[in-house]
Image (cartoon, rainbow, N blue to C red):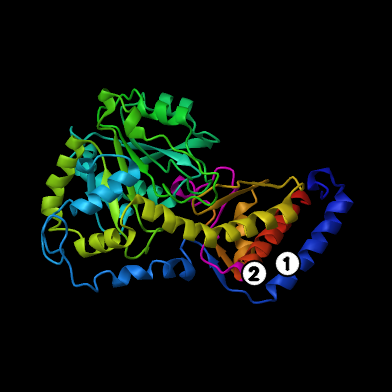
Amino acid sequence: MAKSYLSMSAAELQAELESVKKEYEDIKAQGLSIDMSRGKPGSDQLDISDGMLKVFDDGNFKCEAGLDVRNYGLLDGIPECKKLFADLLEVKPENVIVGGNSSLSLMFDYVSQCMYQGAGFTPWSQQGKVKFLCPCPGYDRHFAICEYFGIEMINIPMTAEGPDMDAIEEAVKDSSVKGMFCVPKYSNPQGITFSAETVKRIANLDTAADDFRIIWDNAYCVHDLTETTDELVNIFDVLPEKNKDMVIEVASTSKISYPGAGVSCLVSSVDNIKAILKRLTVQAISYDKVNMLRHVKFFKDVQGIKEHMQLHAKILKPKFDAVIDTLNSDLAGLGIAEWNEPNGGYFISLDVTGGSASRVGVLCKEAGVTLTNVGATFPYGKDPTDSNIRIAPTFPTPEVLSKAVKVLTVSVKLACLENLTR
């Protein structure tokens, strides 16, 4: 194992710095241009869904309700697509609304509804300061929604079991705390799945605000990389009656079929579904039912989705392994970085010491590798310890990915050595 930088003498650190500087300059001279800023599927992943484009060759555009899906109607989605999502998420079809291609839009629209129409009570915008709990590191798009609506964000540290429940249970004693965003399975970016105990404590929260809402963003519900899959407790199975309206779950096929042409869904209580549909009757005539039926014809049922996800895993697992292997070979034992090894999801989370993450981001960019903006995994783009880096390994080819991760590890060593030798 490599000698820890933390145990090196000043002379040893200086010598190591000069060596790593030379390695960095050699890499920089390669003139790379690699974008790893977002978790996008690669073209090989998109290809495995192309059979979906041929499912209407039979000329049958009618759903099981007898409606031609090319026409208006069925605002909440066609019955067979509602059932597909219901089976996938283990809920009842009457608790499901099927949307367009983006679950992000469903989340944005729901928060907007709460701000201006309320969540069964006075609109949030008329109640003074509104606050949201934000487990972090977390998903930058969640934070962007809060920032757009002027919602104050409160950092909640993530643990190996999920968000710090002691901190959450204390925070919800404040009636101005109206909600929480979270990714409960294979969290973005750490790949953590909430433990059964964490899910139960979330479900049983005793909140000061009667209109507290949890946006349960189950984006990676079937995105396993290995046979050692993480199991997530269905929060609706453990919700007490007093909290029956508290959870708004969303999911989509964005990283199952096509990100730009998938199908999303929203799951909640009957009363919440009624309130959302009341808004939707003004907002929309109907979502893309052709796409809904296309997905049902292609996948047929949940088993079809799971078999399809195994094809994704065969493509993605070698990429995740390549990142982990390089991190282990280049950084293990140096005492300057820690990382997760997730069983699923779309990201790997890397934490570096000494407040060096921003410098790593700059060094990578100068060497031709664009990462997610450092700080983006925290509210307001401000990582209080300047330590977290989100690695998105899915889009590059394995060959390109290997080069990118080498740039990353050399940049980590250089940034940390610069700090240690100051």
Q: For mark 1, what is the residue?
A: 24
Q: Is residue 4 left or right of residue 65?
A: right
User: Which is the main secondary structure of the residues drawn in magenta?
Assistant: loop
Q: Position of residue 366 (x, y in %)?
A: 62, 68
What count of labels does the image hold? 2
Q: Please name whichever residue, 124 or 39, is drawn nearer the observer in this view of the structure.
A: 39
Relative to residue 148, is residue 333 drawn left or right? right
- Confirm whether residue 329 shows in the render: yes
Report the Cα–Cα distance between label 1 and label 2.
8 Å
Decide: few, some or many residues near mark 1? Use Cα within 10 Å; few <14, some 14-19, many ≥20.
many
Quarter of the image for residue 363 reads: bottom right
Identify residue for label 2: 367
The location of residue 260, given as percent across then percent down, is: 34, 65
Q: Nearer the viewer, residue 363 or 392?
A: 392
The answer to whether marks 1 and 2 mark residues whose Cβ atoms lie closer than 8 Å is: yes
- Residue at the (34%, 46%) spot, across then down: 88
Give the magenta-colored segment's residue range.
375-399
